[in-house]
Amino acid sequence: MMTYASIASLTINCNNVANRMNLGFAGVIAPVLAIASSFGFASAIGIEFTNIVGVMPFLVVGIGIDDMFILMSGMADAPPLSKSSIMERVVFMMQKSGIAITITSLTDLLAFVIGATSVFKSIRNFCIYTGVAVFFCYLNQLFFLCPAIRLNEGRTKEKRHFCLCWKEVQPDNHYIGHSKCFTRCTAGHPPETREDVESPMEKYPKNIMLFMLSSLWGKVLITISFMTYLAAAIYGCFHLEQGLQLYNLAAKDSYFYTYSAWDNEFYTIEPYVQILSSTLQTIGIAVAVMLFVTFAFMPDVRVVLIVCVTLVCILVGIFGFMHFWDLTLSSITMIHLVMSVGFSVDFTVHVCHAFISVEGDERKEVLIKALDRSGGPIVNAAFSTLLGILMLGFSSSYIFISFGKVMFLVIAFGLIHSAFFLPLLLYWLSPFLRKHAMTKVSSSSPCMDTEMNAEKFPPITDSTEKTKKSDNFTDLSKPKY
């Protein structure tokens, strides 16, 4: 995951000043420190470490990398260093991306708080450990990664090499007569546009998304795919089995597994199990809490309604495709589903926040800018999280495997909805959302509005004041001609 984060933030334009590979390392170190803090704090207060807690690092690192890409995307949109100071760029980043990572961190934390109410000790302890790690991960994003971004901005302003930070880099034309390899390894300049700092893994995924969403056949294909997905998910929901087989909790090479399998096959007993109603009630509470948090940070009923519809579609898909993946609705998968609510909100909030915060008059312009800001981060965050979840496929424990399968469905469906289904819906509804949303966004960013107005209307000095007065003054004693 550290290798992926570093490669995903590595530019290939041979600009050794604008390269952000070091921030990829910092973006992974922040959640790793949070994991260590969680182990220490939870153990210090007497929370027992159980085997399922071993899954926690894969999830927390994925959350941390998600926040890293969001912050880096916000910094890439900031005015260049040639037109603004480092502090103004950092303020811009926090205004555009800080609220997004705050919402997702809070929703993830609340999801694990709800999961900590489980009657199963192992699940309860897992949620406590992971919730503490998510909290520390958010703090590390603010007090470790953001200072690292600030230091990287200082290095960029001084035109120093991203790897040899003590060496000042000269522009390309300074090395005329040298070999191309030498020039590529030593030349560079501070970035002026977003393209100067983006890696191929940040550019190409959003270009594919934009290509699909901009063409008519792409919109038709996405619509048909969504209807097919929804029909299959609803079918799976009606055929999802309930109950937990005891032999799944034991190793397959144990005598208990063989005994329980034979007992279930030849002496089947069907008990009256109230897992569905309990699951729906708990998930309903979790969804209500997530929507309340979303409304607190983005107080627009229409946006919250869109988040709610998207969240329900993702949950229906998870329930339905559990049937196709031989998973049953049990007390264990119920906790997994409750925790998945927080992860399902993450990508949806990023896309919605991007659509209501970018500037633009036409729908296509808004779509391009929104995907430019959120497309790359959500794709890379999803892939990095999936890398960690895939490791659970090598486990022999039913709890680990079922957890990995559910989280795979959560991340996969969350990515598909946020990359294709949700942007298409927002594209259609953009004229109805932009009028009210832009007013709130502009009023919530006084610093950047002041900066933009300052560029359009320079401050009035004594000379300009006199000029203004002389231009406005009309001497009636002289004829106009």
Image: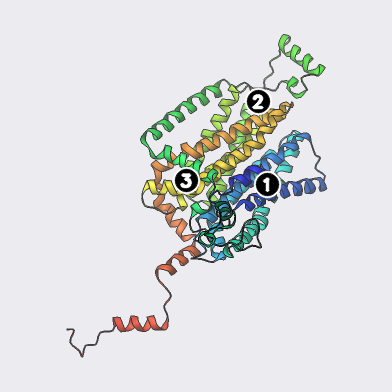
Chain-order first, disc 2 or disc 3: 2
Query: Disc 2 residue type?
Result: Gln
Helix, strand or loop status at disc 2: loop
Residue 117 — which label?
none
Q: Name the quarter where the N terminus is drawn.
A: top right
- Residue marked by disc 2: 274
Q: Where is residue 164 drawn, in percent x and y? A: 66, 58
Q: Residue furthest top?
A: 266
The image quadrant of residue 327 is top right
The answer to whether 158 is drawn above or below residue 408 in the figure is below
Q: Is residue 298 visible?
A: yes
Query: Disc 3 residue type?
Result: Leu
The answer to whether 73 is drawn above or below residue 275 in the figure is below
Q: Where is residue 180 drawn, in percent x and y? A: 55, 52
Badge 1: how crowded within 10 Å, few (<14), some, or many (20+)? many
Q: Nearer the viewer, residue 177 or 1?
A: 177
The image quadrant of residue 264 is top right
Circle 2 or circle 1, nearest the eye: 1
Q: Where is residue 415 drawn, in percent x and y? A: 54, 37
Badge 2: how crowded within 10 Å, few (<14), some, or many (20+)? few
Query: Disc 1 residue type?
Result: Val
Circle 1 or circle 3, nearest the eye: 3
In contact (CB < 8 Å): disc 2 and disc 1: no
The answer to whether 437 is drawn above or below residue 126 in the figure is below
- Residue marked by disc 3: 371
Chain-order first, disc 2 or disc 1: 1
Helix, strand or loop status at disc 1: helix
Q: Where is residue 457 drawn, in percent x and y? A: 40, 71
